[in-house]
């Protein structure tokens, strides 16, 4: 056990201490050989919220949401009228128990259909919003790739609230430059 312990301790020392020396040497060599890298960042939240494509598509989704809410409100009102009518007829004794049971079953079915419709509409809107966000990000990414010669950066990071990039010097911020360019390109394509 003592020999095994010494062997493991030796491997530990070689792995962690030996690795640091190699890493330091490797970093120094890479720093000497590599040219300075162009690095910039784009505030993704700002670009998306001010990008004309996002605003146009969000308007479409908002219109669909209003239509879905109107449809849901209409069906909800029909259901409420049915419930009120059922309660009125039962309270006045205008229907038999068998008829009341049938009416109650129909109302339960209508309520379930209403819940299913709400869930379906909500799911569809969420999916459309996710697709829209992916399309906007894809457009921005493709624009940066297609115009990489104009920007001449090795890396362009995306900075967003809660993202991985916690701090960046404002001198490397190209958000407005990218926003102006993609809005110009989008407006040209839109025409």
Image: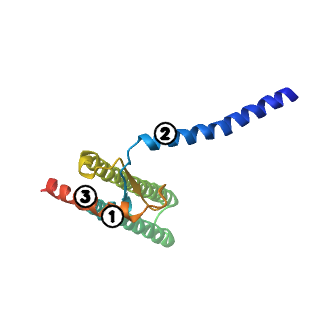
Q: Specify the label residue 16 is tagged with.
A: none
Tell me: residue 35, above or below residue 114: above
Q: From the image, tell me which residue sits under label 2.
A: 29
Q: Residues within 10 Å of mark 2 (few under 14, many from 20)?
A: few
Cα distance in 3D space between marks 3 and 2? 45 Å
Quadrant of the drawing holding the C terminus: bottom left
Residue 60 can be seen in this image: no
Residue 131 or residue 33, whichever sits in front: 33
Residue at coordinates 27% horizontally, 61% vertically from top-left? 177
Q: Position of residue 149 (x, y in %)?
A: 24, 47
Q: From the image, tell me which residue sits under label 3.
A: 53
Furthest-right residue in view? 2
Residue 52 or residue 101, whichever sits in front: 52
Q: From the image, tell me which residue sits under label 1.
A: 49
Residue 103 or residue 163, whichever sits in front: 163
Residue at coordinates 23% horizontally, 51% vertically from top-left? 150
Earlier in the chain: of badge 2 and badge 1, it is 2
Q: Secondary structure at mark 3?
A: helix
Foreground mark, 3 or 2?
Answer: 2
Q: Secondary structure at mark 2?
A: helix
Cα distance in 3D space between marks 1 and 3? 10 Å
Q: Position of residue 137 (x, y in %)?
A: 33, 52
Residue at coordinates 16% horizontally, 55% vertically from top-left? 190
Q: Are marks 1 and 3 in contact (CB under 8 Å)?
A: no
């Amino acid at each position: 056990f003592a020999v095994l312990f010494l062997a493991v301790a030796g491997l530990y020392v070689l792995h962690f201490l030996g690795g640091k020396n190699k890493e330091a040497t490797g970093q120094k060599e890479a720093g000497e050989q590599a040219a300075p890298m162009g690095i910039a960042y784009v505030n993704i939240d700002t670009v998306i919220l001010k990008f004309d494509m996002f605003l146009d598509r969000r308007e479409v989704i908002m219109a669909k949401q209003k239509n879905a809410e109107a449809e849901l409100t209409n069906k909800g009102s029909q259901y409420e009228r049915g419930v009120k009518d059922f309660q009125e007829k039962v309270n006045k004794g205008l229907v038999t128990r068998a008829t009341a049971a049938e009416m109650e079953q129909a109302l339960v079915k209508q309520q379930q259909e209403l819940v299913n419709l709400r869930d379906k509409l909500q799911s569809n809107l969420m999916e459309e919003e996710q697709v829209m966000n992916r399309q906007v990000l894809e457009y921005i990414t493709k624009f940066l790739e297609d115009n990489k010669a104009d920007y001449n950066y090795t890396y362009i990071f995306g900075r967003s609230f809660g993202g991985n990039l916690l701090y960046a010097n404002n001198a490397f911020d190209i958000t407005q430059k990218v926003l102006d360019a993609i809005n110009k390109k989008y407006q040209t394509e839109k025409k």
